[in-house]
Image: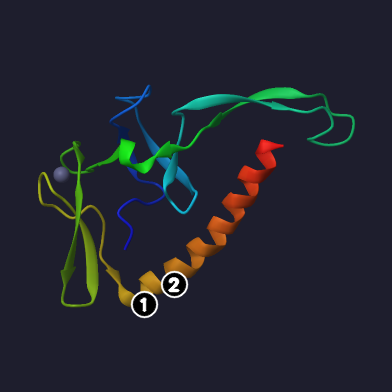
Amino acid sequence: MRKLRIGDKVKIIAGKEKGKIGKVIGFVKDREYVLVEGVNLVTKFIKKGWLGEGKEGTKVKVEAPIHRSNVMVVCPHCEKPTRISITIEDKTHKYRTCKKCGKYIDKGVSKQEEKQKASESKTKKRKTTRKVKESKI
Ligand SMILES: [Zn+2]
């Protein structure tokens, strides 16, 4: 079970974006880095014609990856950035637990569901990698 997931609210705890809070919208480089909505924005230049024939080039702001050690999940219960521990109950369900207040961060995932999610995220990962390569051109 991953400690950090897409849709999690995270707080940036180090670097130039320190203190900002945003939602995880993606992962890159084997989940070493996360993309946080609206945080660590960089300007990318899109070449003329890239968006379609005859379209002018333009500038866009996109989220740059942040190392996962620089973010912390914000607990939905106590609203504090916290470390996560994994709790296993009934030998079948796993929960992510807030180390500050001890409450479950989300509902438990059974082994079967986890397997399913793993295969889904593989597909997603492939897509993300391709996107990153394209944007470097
Ligand atoms: Zn909490």
Who is closer to the viewer here, 35 or 102? 35
Kind of element beneath mark 1? helix
Q: Is residue 59 above or below residue 27?
A: above
Q: Residues within 10 Å of mark 2 (few under 14, many from 20)?
A: few
Quarter placement of the N terminus: bottom left
Who is closer to the viewer here, 71 or 55? 71
Q: Position of residue 102 (x, y in %)?
A: 10, 51
Quarter placement of the C terminus: top right
Q: Which residue is mark 2?
A: 116
Q: Which mark is residue 112?
A: 1
- Residue for point 51% across, 26% down: 41
Kind of element beneath mark 2? helix
Question: Could you tell me the amino acid type at mark 2?
Answer: Gln
- Residue for point 78% across, 28% down: 47
Q: Position of residue 38 (x, y in %)?
A: 46, 29
- Label 1 and label 2: CA atoms lie apart by 6 Å
Q: Position of residue 128 (x, y in %)?
A: 57, 50
- Residue for point 37% across, 52% down: 5
Q: Is residue 113 above or below residue 131?
A: below
Is the CB atom of the residue marked by disc 2 within 8 angstroms of ligand 1's nearest atom? no
